[in-house]
Amino acid sequence: MVRNKPVTAAVAAVAVLVLVAAAIVLSGTSSADRYVEELDQVAHEQEMPGFVVRCGTNSERHLNADNPVVSPGIPFGAHHTHEYVGNKSADARSTDESLAAAPTTCEKDDRSTYYWPVLRLTDGTGPDAHAEGGGVHGNTGEVLQPRSVEIRYEGNPVSAVLPMPRFLRLITGDPAAFSSGFGPNTRARWGCSDQPGRYTTRYPLCGNATTVRSYEFGSCWDGSNTDSASHRTHVVFPVAGGACPPKTFPIPKLRVVVGYDVPPGRPFAIDSFPEELRDPATDHAMFINVMPEAMMNELTGHLNGAR
């Protein structure tokens, strides 16, 4: 998704006003108002076998305003800054060949790319206040490094899974959720570490607990393509109960959970397209599979053997 709309001071000012208003609203709401219970989902998650890949928390600060899945070949094509773990070379210029040759922060030589918009404290300025993806596109503030990042693959509740094809590209969530009226691609899940299983599409107030962002990717593959024009139709989500729709095949379900230590009382927001006003519902994440085939086979065997 490439955006070429100019950013004006008026747009940036409106974004700040919206964030302030959101903070006021949230600070006056009760826990019951802010959160949505997903008890059935929690029970399902607890039953599913998993395979965790440790990739660190981006201590080397691999950040850029590129999007190698949605806008390959276009520097600053994201118009907001992304945080990466895994492949150390991922940027707008990445190709299958360059990703396969690059080093990684993940264990077992998993060279896959996992990335999502940065989270910032918004009551100050960061070093990119005058840079593309940062202040030029209305995204200001100090970027917070994640406290924790969990990369987890899960099986399918009704069927064995096939290995993911190498160089498979995925996106979850809708970076244009605000302007598109919060449609079916909106999948933002915010929560607090001290209230597991409770999620919201709004910014949560977690106090001294860890602020959590959770991303779940589609896991029903069309059997032939590693990408599609929308970056969505080649891999879709299961239907109720976990079965894959007709003419699709179950693959490992990728779940990424990112935790942050947000100082109590400090306002924060994710990066977004300027017109999305940093709305929390626009949260999204991307993935490129560059896992060694032997590791993918090990992962698939583990998930199928645990069924």
Image (spheres, grey):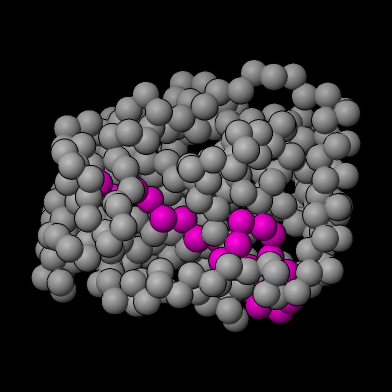
Position in image of residue 174 (x %, y %): 53, 41
Extent of the magenta region: 199-220
Q: Residue furthest front?
A: 240
Residue 184 placement, left or right of 218: right
* 203 lies above or below 75: below
Total numbered labels: 0
Asked whether 205 falls inside the magenta stretch, the response is yes
Question: Looking at the image, can residue 90 be seen?
Answer: yes
In the picture, residue 288 is in which quadrant?
A: top left
Name the residue nearer the viewer: 145 or 249. Answer: 249
In the picture, residue 28 is in which quadrant?
A: bottom right
* 86 lies above or below 28: above
* 8 lies above or below 101: above
Name the residue nearer the viewer: 35 or 97. Answer: 35
Residue that appears at 81% across and 49% down: 19
Position in image of residue 220 (x %, y %): 25, 46
Residue 273 placement, left or right of 9: left
Residue that appears at 69% across and 19% down: 5
The quadrant the C terminus occupies is bottom left
Classified by dominant secondary structure, the portion drawn in magenta counts as loop
Position in image of residue 144 (x %, y %): 67, 57
In the picture, residue 100 is in which quadrant?
A: top left
